[in-house]
Image: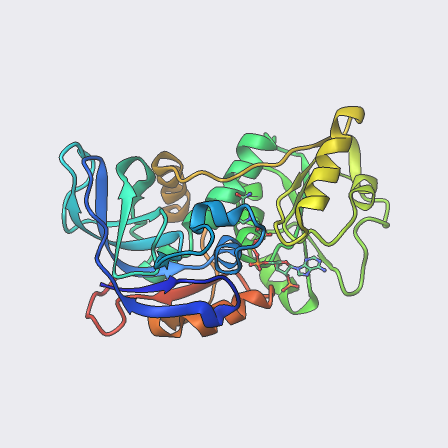
Amino acid sequence: MKAIVQNSYGSPDVLELKEIAPPVLRDDDVLLRVVAASLNAGDLFSMRGSPWLARFAVGFPRPRDYVLGWDAAGVVEAVGKSVTRFKPGESVYCACQGTLAEVARARESTVAMKPASLDFEKAAAVPTACLTALKGLRDVGKVRPGQKVLINGASGGVGTFAVQIGRTLGAEVTGVCSARNVEMVRALGADHVVDYTEEDFTSGGQQYDLILDNAGNRSFSDLRRALTPRGMILPNSGYGGMGYVLRALALAPFLRQQASMFAAQPSGADLDALTELIDAGKVGPVVDRTYPLHEARQAFRYLEEEHARGKVVLSVAQGRGVGP
Ligand SMILES: NC(=O)c1ccc[n+]([C@@H]2O[C@H](COP(=O)([O-])OP(=O)(O)OC[C@H]3O[C@@H](n4cnc5c(N)ncnc54)[C@H](OP(=O)(O)O)[C@@H]3O)[C@@H](O)[C@H]2O)c1
């Protein structure tokens, strides 16, 4: 199968389109013929081997034909002996490792039926970013109706979903983004939008019950100013670096305000819940650009700019005649 692999760490130049063996099917796996995949900030960390921790998962001292990608939508090609929920030919989506390839392998427990209302490219944009927004706001932040929630970085992969998930949880949502994205974030359902090039959300006196920080560009003390006395900060940004996250966590035990780090987990059950919201028209992906698989380097370069509007998608089946 064709796949985007890396054999060293660095810039998008380390990415190669290569013919490699497809993954081996295990008993509780679903093999997926990938139609589309999407990129996440985590793919940049894998590609660069930075933060260093990433190298333990990707390959130490260097990766060996490591297949990038964590999100896929496609068609079930084969299922393992103990798989009961899926059969060949069904259209599914999931978060699993190694999706920038013609075939990917996922645990049955991480797979869900593709939302009927989305084509494969849009469905591939959903899993990791939307699961992150769901976990952060619903499970960790425990957002309740009427609470004031601020999403810093509301126009990117996670943020566009977080605005919508916040609204489905009944929160009053404020999104922070640059001027060119204000209208889009408002259209996603944000009650208020702050253009960070014009206004500083930490100094206007407004306070929030929860801040989901996807941008990592503000100090912990700045964010605390914009937080209610018992509010919570979710420092979600790998871009801000571990120092920022650790400072937030180290201070948390001494304050009534809370900071809590979290990692999204692949989950078929949570994707089922998202499928319902998507097919009901309450949540939907924003796809900024779609690249063919062989242009993965260009796609990663665009992602590196950290100003994608929603998601960057790779079309894996382009030209293979697999329709929505
Ligand atoms: N916890 C987890 O399990 C998990 C999972 C996935 C991702 N993440 C983390 O989530 C973070 C965001 O990921 P993403 O996919 O949403 O990234 P992204 O698509 O690159 O989005 C970045 C966002 O940051 C905004 N931004 C840039 N400069 C800003 C500023 N000065 N003030 C406010 N916003 C600013 C951009 O908006 P404009 O273009 O409008 O400037 C854009 O909306 C990453 O750090 C990633 O590591 C965590």
State the image coordinates of residue 45 (x, y, percent, origin top left). 53, 55
Furthest-front residue in this view: 61
Q: Give the camera-side residue of 65 and 92.
A: 65
Question: Splitting the image into 4 quarters, where does residue 37 fall?
Answer: bottom left
**At 68% across and 51% down in the image, what residue appears?**
240
> Where is residue 29 drawn, in percent x and y?
23, 40
Does residue 169 show up? no
Quadrant where the N terminus sits is bottom left
> Can the viewer see residue 65 in this picture?
yes
Question: In the rendered image, which quarter is residue 99 located in?
Answer: bottom left
- Where's residue 273, x and y in %? 39, 37
213, 262: nearer the viewer? 262
Q: Name which residue lies at 45% across and 62% down.
A: 8
Query: In which of the image's four quarters is ligand 1 placed?
Result: bottom right
From the viewer's perspective, is residue 139 above or below residue 22? above
Q: Position of residue 194 (x, y in %)?
A: 73, 57
The structure residue drawn at horizontal position 34% and vertical position 38%, both measured from the top left corner, is: 268
